[in-house]
Image (cartoon, rainbow, N blue to C red):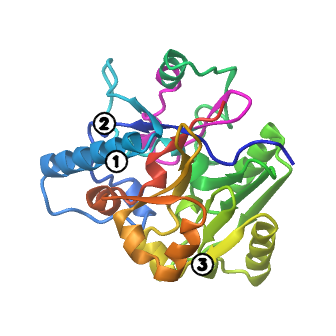
Amino acid sequence: MLDVSRTTDTILMVRPHDFGFNEETGLDNEFQKRPTESEKQINEAANAEFQAMVDSLHANGITVLVLEKPKTPYLRTPDAIFPNNWFSTEHDGTLITYPMAAVSRRYERRPQDVEKLLVANGYKIRNVIHVGALDEQKRFLEGTGSMVIDHREEIVYAARSHRCHPDQFDNFIRLRFYREGILFDTRSSRGKPVYHTNVIMSIGEQFSVICLDCITDPDQRNRVRTSLARSFEVIDISMDQMEHHFCGNILQVNAAGGSPFIVMSRRAFTGFTPKQIRRLEQYGTILPVALDTIESVGGGSARCMIAEIFS
């Protein structure tokens, strides 16, 4: 076990300069809904939600670094608001980039811009590595969307999907010397694998929220439950809470002074039961933000918008 925090007081977010419905990711992301509004209306609404979330985080003492629109010519990146899928950081100062399934999402990768932003704000990047081949075409692994990491226990949880190839998952475990990787199979209410692990589950310092019902194999389900219960109070959510309220897509972060907050969307907050809210409030102040457009059109919620900065 490492003597490190499971949570951080610094996060990075990417301004959604060309946010919109992504036809390519919509093939396996059942959370996306095709909008009736114009592209301009959707983009304006998403930018307003983004800025309100940044302002709320800042107001509560959480350090937010915002990666702005690229200065050089770029291709359209409708999902750039979800940066934790293409990069993550670790406590040893390593910045990791990942192979993305959707071609349109590969254009989001801006490791040099992230490194410049971090260095300009006093953070050290000691290594930059890429998981798998730079032009990977089959074995994808979409960062902390595909994986939920317990940094202290050195355990990585992942739901098998088109965006989480088991060989690439094993490659990541070996590359970063994690103690254990727990891979499991899931099924949505429509019978498809859930596209990302971080809509199923979240890990804080002392709690874990998870939809155990979507894990199809009883042995896998028991292994996940047992592993989490060794370190966390496990708060089980229903399929409805996971699929229609994004209750699994939440994240604990800390203010500069150390005060814990649990960031979630307004939809997630209303989706939790009063008893579940009381249990969560034992571990931090709940910070709900309105993300209706981003959730509906993008198919991701508050946690998807946050890249944690460990250093």
Q: Is 16 left, or right, of 224 in this rendering?
A: left
Q: Earlier in the sequence, mark 3 or mark 1?
A: 1
x, y percentage for residue 8?
Answer: 60, 42
> Residue beneath label 3, please?
214
Do the residues bearing badges 2 and 3 touch, measured as CB atoms within 8 Å?
Answer: no
Q: Nearer the viewer, residue 116 or 71?
A: 116
Within 10 Å of disc 3 (Cα), the crowding (few <14, some 14-19, many 20+) is many
Q: Earlier in the sequence, mark 2 or mark 3?
A: 2
Within 10 Å of disc 1 (Cα), the crowding (few <14, some 14-19, many 20+) is many
Query: Can see residue 78?
Result: no
- Residue under the image location 74 percent in, 47 percent down: 151
x, y percentage for residue 237?
Answer: 55, 78
| Amino acid carrying mark 2 in the image | Arg
Do the residues bearing badges 1 and 2 touch, measured as CB atoms within 8 Å?
Answer: no
> Residue beneath label 2, please?
76
Dot 3: what SS?
Answer: helix
Dot 1: what SS?
Answer: helix
> Residue beneath label 1, please?
53
| Amino acid carrying mark 3 in the image | Cys
x, y percentage for residue 114?
Answer: 50, 25
Marks 1 and 2 sit apart, C-alpha to C-alpha, by 23 Å
Q: Nearer the viewer, residue 58 or 239?
A: 58
Within 10 Å of disc 2 (Cα), the crowding (few <14, some 14-19, many 20+) is some
- Above/below status of 100 relative to 235: above
x, y percentage for residue 301?
Answer: 41, 58
Q: Is 65 left, or right, of 75 in this rendering?
A: right
Q: Which residues are magenta?
A: 88-113
- Residue under the image location 53 percent in, 23 percent down: 118
